[in-house]
């Protein structure tokens, strides 16, 4: 008997199914995006299960997957699949991705390997925040717990005033972002390092500094009157 597939639009952490698939990172210890959301919803039991896997085999390499129990999720199990990640989408990064893709298709060093093709550098959020704050000529404060979704709602009227003052192209901040993705990305309670150096160690020398990428991106947003 043929199985009829069903497409569900909703929150993956609320689905009472046999198994859900998590877009995991190699550490298996949670991170940003959907990975972080699943870990937060599943509670410490999922993290404990992932740590057992790490003790048995180490990190999970890109292109591979492991299965664990699901902790406090209604699903019965979680498949943690590790794959390449796209970080952003500015023009320089697109060019870097294209060059890296061509290199991997031709180089013997890339055979049977999976690469996270991003800027190719090492970066840390706690070191990026001062750079971002300086670009906007703002003072940097200590880490605080907040909801971007709530903050964007609370400052919706203020953004309209800013948009009018600076002739921005969008007066409704919620049309730019509702804050949900930012809550996923920054919802962890620890600092995060990013390491995109595997491809460089294999021989591809394309590189873009992440701090410079953000500053260039902000400059283009300002020139396009997206931000003041």
Image (tube, helix red, strand yellow):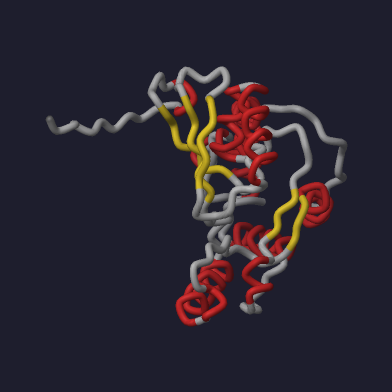
Query: Which quadrant holds residue 4?
Result: top left
- Along the horizontal axis of the image, is 11 left or right of 28? left
When the figure is inspected, residue 60 is found, relative to residue 34, above or below; the finding is: below
User: Residue at (60%, 44%) from the top-left corner?
Assistant: 163
The residue positioned 44% from the left and 31% from the top of the image is 20
User: Residue 97, position in %: x, y?
Assistant: 53, 69
At a point 77% along the width and 52% down the height, the residue shown is 124
**Image spot of residue 73 (x, y percent):** 52, 20
**Residue 87 vs residue 190: left or right?**
left
22, 120: nearer the viewer: 22
- Left or right of 78? Residue 59 is right
Q: Residue 204 in the image: x percent, y percent? A: 62, 78
Give the farthest residue toward the front: 56
The answer to whether residue 161 shows anywhere in this view is no
Rendered-image quadrant of the N terminus = top left
Residue 134 shown left or right of residue 218 in the figure: right
């Amino acid at each position: 008997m043929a199985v009829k597939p069903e497409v569900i639009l909703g929150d993956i952490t609320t689905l009472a199914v046999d198994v859900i698939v998590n877009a995991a990172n190699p550490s298996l210890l949670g991170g940003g995006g959907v990975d972080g959301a699943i870990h937060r919803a599943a509670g410490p039991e999922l993290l404990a299960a992932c740590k057992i896997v790490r003790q048995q085999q180490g990190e999970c390499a890109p292109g591979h997957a492991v299965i664990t129990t699901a902790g406090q999720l209604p699903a019965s199990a979680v498949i943690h699949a590790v794959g390449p990640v796209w970080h952003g989408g500015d023009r320089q990064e697109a060019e870097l991705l294209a060059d890296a893709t061509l290199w991997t298709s031709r180089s013997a060093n890339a055979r049977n390997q999976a690469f996270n093709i991003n800027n190719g550098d090492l970066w840390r959020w706690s070191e990026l925040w001062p750079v971002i704050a300086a670009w906007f000529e703002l003072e940097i404060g200590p880490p605080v717990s907040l909801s971007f979704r709530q903050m964007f709602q609370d400052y919706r009227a203020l953004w309209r005033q800013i948009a009018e003052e600076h002739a921005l192209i969008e007066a409704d901040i919620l049309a730019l972002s509702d804050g949900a993705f930012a809550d996923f990305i920054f919802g962890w309670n620890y600092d995060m390092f990013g390491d995109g150096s595997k491809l460089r160690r294999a021989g591809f020398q394309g590189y873009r500094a992440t701090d410079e990428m953000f500053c260039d991106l902000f400059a283009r947003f300002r020139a396009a009157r997206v931000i003041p």
